[in-house]
Image (cartoon, rainbow, N blue to C red):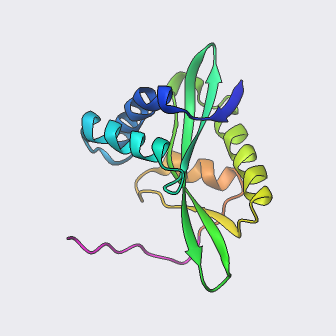
């Protein structure tokens, strides 16, 4: 397995994985074209975030995206894990664990305060995976203002 930062050539595969992720985790059918454009935005603007890719057998088998939040309370950056996906036939083989270990190392190098994620309440497999990785549930509820 090889882990690396994503590049513009990876956009199609990342978008395909995001469409699968939305359907699997939240039963949402999202637009490939809109998602593809969104992935290209991140890949072209490092201020928006970055993707980390896991490759095996010359194929992208896992991914995650990091976006940034500034914490004035801590005077440090918080990294948010998003678009976490491992292709089904590669699950339970340490792909996600290796991606998280790389993110942990990168976050420490960049003086990040902590790494957070949000997960759909019904995504029990993901919740159990995150717990197994040592992540702790925090006492927050997310609200969204429709615009």
Residue at point 70%, 33% (across, down): 94
Q: Nearer the viewer, residue 9 or 123?
A: 9
Main SS of residues in magenta: loop
Residue at point 61%, 47% (across, down): 129
Q: Nearer the viewer, residue 121 or 20?
A: 20
Q: Position of residue 25 (x, y in %)?
A: 39, 45
Does residue 74 appear left or right of residue 33 in this picture? right
Magenta range is: 138-147
Residue at point 67%, 60% (across, down): 135
Q: Quick one: which residue is furthest to the left in this view?
A: 147
Q: Nearer the viewer, residue 1 or 50?
A: 50
Q: Position of residue 7 (x, y in %)?
A: 54, 32
Q: Is residue 37 visible?
A: yes
Q: Quick check: 89 above or below 66?
A: above
Does residue 49 appear left or right of residue 120 in this picture? right
Based on the picture, tell me whether residue 22 belongs to the magenta stretch: no
- Kindly indicate the quadrant of the structure image that contains residue 38: top left
Q: Is residue 23 visible?
A: no
Q: Quick check: 14 above or below 134?
A: above
Does residue 126 appear left or right of residue 100 in this picture? left
Does residue 94 appear left or right of residue 35 in this picture? right
Q: Position of residue 99 (x, y in %)?
A: 67, 40
Check the picture and name the quadrant holding the C terminus.
bottom left
Based on the picture, tell me whether residue 142 belongs to the magenta stretch: yes
């Amino acid at each position: 397995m090889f882990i690396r930062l994503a590049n513009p050539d990876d956009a199609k595969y990342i978008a395909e994985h995001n469409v699968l992720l939305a359907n699997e985790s939240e039963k949402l059918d999202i637009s490939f074209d809109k998602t593809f454009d969104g992935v290209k935005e991140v890949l072209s603007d490092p201020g928006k975030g970055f993707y980390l890719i896991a490759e095996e057998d010359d194929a992208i088998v896992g991914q995650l995206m990091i976006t940034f939040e500034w914490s004035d309370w801590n005077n440090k950056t918080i990294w948010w894990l998003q678009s976490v996906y491992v292709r089904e036939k590669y699950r339970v083989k340490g792909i996600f664990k290796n991606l998280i270990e790389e993110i942990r190392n990168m976050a420490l190098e960049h003086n990040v305060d902590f790494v957070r994620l949000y997960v759909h309440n019904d995504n029990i497999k993901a919740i159990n995976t995150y717990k197994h990785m040592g992540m702790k549930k925090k006492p927050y509820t997310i609200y969204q203002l429709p615009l």
